[in-house]
Amino acid sequence: MEEITLWVGLAIEIALIIVTMLIISSHLRNISKNKTNFQLNEQYYKSLFEENPDAIIIFDLDGKFVVANKAVTIYGYSVEELIDKPFAGFILPKDLERVTGHFIEAVEGRATNYECTILDKEGFQREISVTNIPIFVNSQIYGVYTIIKDITEHKKAQNDLVEAEAKYRSLIENSLVGVYIMQDGKLVYVNPGLCEMSGYTCEELIGLNVADFIYPEDLPLVNENILKRFNNETGAIKYEYRAIRKDQSVITFELYGSKIVYHGRDAIIGTVIDITERKNTEKMIKHMAYHDQLTDLPNRYLLREKLNETITDSKQNNCNFALVFLDLDRFKSINDTMGHEVGDQVLMEIAERLKACVNDKDIISRYGGDEFSILLPGSEEQRASIVAQQIIAKLSYPLTFQHHELMVTPSIGIAVFPTHGESFDTLIKNADLAMYHAKSLGRNNFQFFNKELNKKAQHELDMEVNLRKALEQNQFVLFYQPQVNLETNEIYGAEALIRWTHPEKGIIPPAAFIPLAEETGLIIPMGEWAIRTACQENIKWQEAGYSPVTISVNISAKQFFQSNLVEIVESALRETGLNPNYLELEITESITMDVERSITTLLELQRIGVKISIDDFGTGYSSLNYLKRLPIDKLKIDQSFIQECPHDINSNTLVRTIIIMAHLLRMKVVAEGVETEEQVSFLLGQGCKEAQGYLFSKPLSVSEFETKYMRKRLGK
């Protein structure tokens, strides 16, 4: 106890010296003279020693604790627990040798500062900063005065900062995103990502003026945004600009930057993303959205935008423009007979020919299907007429595909702003009406819109509505035109012809509604109805005891190429019980042009037992090749050839050739439109034994046909 008291006294004396130097130097001269001041200084020491937030310890020369202030409790120990224990027990083994060396230096009279790691009472590591001061008494060292600062949190923060900086640097250096720091208009830092994007090395970029690799047209934008960021007008901002790579190719960057202080001066730090591919993709998607995929012409959506812009400009400048709308005549038959591949080639060729008819300011668009439109800004009727005439002339040259020579003619309608409309929808509608008017006048011509066309359009709309209603209300009936054996003068069959029995207008002939039915697609349900009805009425005649006859039903190209034609025929035969031998399907010559598409359906129909004939032979796209490949039973010579017989040599030659060819191919021949006995004699002389026409009978209703022919065959 006396030794501790001695050390405490010694510590007090040393502390008084330190306190006297740092805090109360003005009182040093009076300490030895004034007892009161000594007591006061003793209180100063106690406050400095006991209340100091840093641990203050006195070690003897052997490194054992002699005395400590209460700050040591932050390590979990009381002062009493530490007294007379060596410091070595609290030092981590890795630091012990180094700490011991510092202690020896203090014992030898040299003050030292160092850092090390100790264990607190709970076994946790604590980082400390240590100051060892030798204690001199009369020039002799009696111990070591140690001040300990706990720097655990400081070291942790320091380590966290180093770790964060390492992570940041690793992230930046390995990032796919370009990173830069710009100062005074020059790059002072770039990461490898930016080097890869730009094609430059880091050394080449550092110190480079940003204006040296920015696309000239975008430089004002870049400078404006740099100024805004330095002026803190927008804070961190993002924008796009084009840059020039080292290889002089142009790329698009998306840049995000903000103001910072770098090495004590204002700078801009930012990230750069190469969005060239994205911009190209967006451009491609936009192009695809506004252009026709087949012809690469603007589509109807881009036409709407351009036409609306032209309307606005024309109103502001008080000028006119014209909208030309054209449709390719009979194009659907090309698709139906030769396939869509040929149809696509035709459309691409038409697009190229249209380009030759206009100038750079005009806009050609594929409106849809086989419809094209041409916007003629600043044009009136006169120029529109000239362009329409050029189109007709350009399209008059035949097209050759798959060894077939095709003629594609246009029907053209024209609307002029503002006379024929002041909005997109009105102009398109009126140009479309004018186009249909041109088609009704024989095709291959152009017409301007006029008010009378609205009335006609309304009539056709009403007609379509009535056609649909006619299907729903069973207003259609079949008439039958007898087919006669010219040698026996007896009927062997009949052609079923559809008629519309309108409740108010009476019987409407096919020419008045079949074209509209084809256009609207109603021909498909009408054709299915005709097949079923012909089968039903034929089987009724047989069940009534009449001799069987073959009924032929016309099949349109659209109906023929629908996927379920064979199923429809099979269903009609199965439901009615009609023998397939008594059903004949008449197809148009154009259907047989696409041999690959038609042969499958024809073979299926042949398998069922249905007969196949080609109607109006000689008027379509004639090709002898299909006749030897397709399962055709009969050729029907078109009435236009028969009408001139036997007085026209050319007609005679054509008819004779068709008959001989059919016989050589083991096909039957039927002559249509026979009206005179001379024609009968001529046909018999050429070996044609079957015919139909007004010489024998006009088309008859079911009851008339039954009374005049079916009963007569039974002698009733």
Image (cartoon, rainbow, N blue to C red):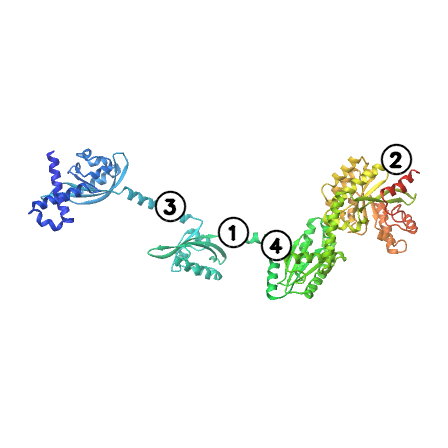
Residue 65 vertical position relative to residue 202 in the rendered view, above or below: above
Judge from the rendering whether residue 255 lies leftward or rightward of residue 459; answer left or right.
left
Residue 303: x %, y % from top left: 62, 57
Asked whether 645 or 657 is in front, the reply is 645
Q: Which circle's residue, 2 or 1, is located before the other in the chain?
A: 1
In the rendered picture of this protein, how many numbered marks are placed on residues? 4
Question: Of the residues tagged 4 and 3, which is closer to the observer?
Answer: 4
Q: Which circle's residue, 4 or 2, is located before the other in the chain?
A: 4
Dot 3: element: helix
Q: Label 2 is placed on what type of residue?
A: Gly
Residue 434 visible from this viewpoint: yes
Disc 1/disc 4 C-alpha distance (Å):
23 Å
Residue 540: x %, y % from top left: 84, 37
- Looking at the rendered image, the quarter that the C terminus falls into is top right
Disc 2/disc 3 C-alpha distance (Å):
100 Å
Q: What residue would you read off at disc 3?
A: 167
Asked whether 559 or 347 is in front, the reply is 559
Q: What residue would you read off at disc 2?
A: 545
Q: Which circle's residue, 2 or 3, is located before the other in the chain?
A: 3
Q: Label 3 is placed on what type of residue?
A: Lys
Outermost residue toward the front? 504
Q: What residue would you read off at disc 4?
A: 301
Q: Residue 307: which quarter of the image?
A: bottom right
Q: Residue 278 carries which label?
A: 1
Disc 3/disc 1 C-alpha distance (Å):
29 Å
Q: Residue 9: which quarter of the image?
A: top left
